[in-house]
Image (cartoon, grey):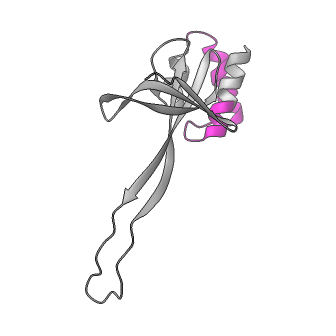
Amino acid sequence: ERILKVILGDETYVFVKYEIRGKMDYGYLTRLDSGKLTILAKKVVRFTDKQEAKALESSNTPAKFTRTPDVYYYKIGSGEITKAGSLKNLIGNLPDHQDEVESYAKKEKLSTRNAEDLNKLATYYNGL
C-alpha cells in the first residue's frame, strides 16, 4: 500500500481499491487515460497447472500462463472505481455533458470492451 504508482516504460500502474466478484480487493491497475474521467485496466493472466497424460495421449500437458482479455474500470473525479459494464451506464454516471458524450459515442460507434474506444471517450469527455 505504500507504493501508490509504478511507471514501467510507457505504462503507469496505480494502486487502487476495486470490486471483483462482489468483494473489494486491492491491486495495481494500468492507467490508460486520466483527467476528470480516468480509465483503468486490469491485466488478467490465468495459470493452468500441468496435467498428466490421459489414455491414448503420448505426453503430459505442461503448465502454462494464458492472457485473457483485460477488464476495464473507470473513475469519475475522486469517486470510487466502477467496472465498465455497458456504455449507457458509463455515460449515465457522468455528472455533466451526458448528451454530448452520448452523441459522440454513437457517431464513433464506441464500446466499453475496447481500450482504444474507452480512451477516445475519456479524451473527448475530459476535453469538454
* Residue 116 vertical placement versus 33 (above, below): below
> Is residue 104 located in the magenta-colored stretch of the structure?
yes
Count of numbered circles on the image: 0
> Looking at this view, is 76 or 108 the one in front?
76
Residue at image point 30% right, 72% down: 51
Horizontally, residue 54 falls left or right of residue 125, namely left
Question: Which residue occupies the extreme front position in the image?
Answer: 2
Residues drawn in magenta = 95-119
Residue extending farthest to the left is: 55
Quarter-of-image position of residue 99? top right
Relative to 6, say whether 92 is above or below: above
Q: Quadrant of residue 115?
A: top right
Residue 14 placement (x, y as % from top left):
54, 27
The rendered magenta stretch, by its main secondary structure, is classed as helix
Residue in the image at 60% along x and 15% along y: 98
Could you tell me residue 41's position as x and y percent? 54, 36
Q: Position of residue 46 (x, y in %)?
A: 41, 53
Find out whether residue 110 is within the magenta segment.
yes
Quadrant location of the N terminus in the rendered image: top left
In this rendering, position of residue 42 left or right of residue 125: left
Residue at 46% from the left image edge and 58% from the top image edge: 66
Q: Quadrant of residue 52?
A: bottom left
In this picture, residue 56 sits left or right of residue 113: left
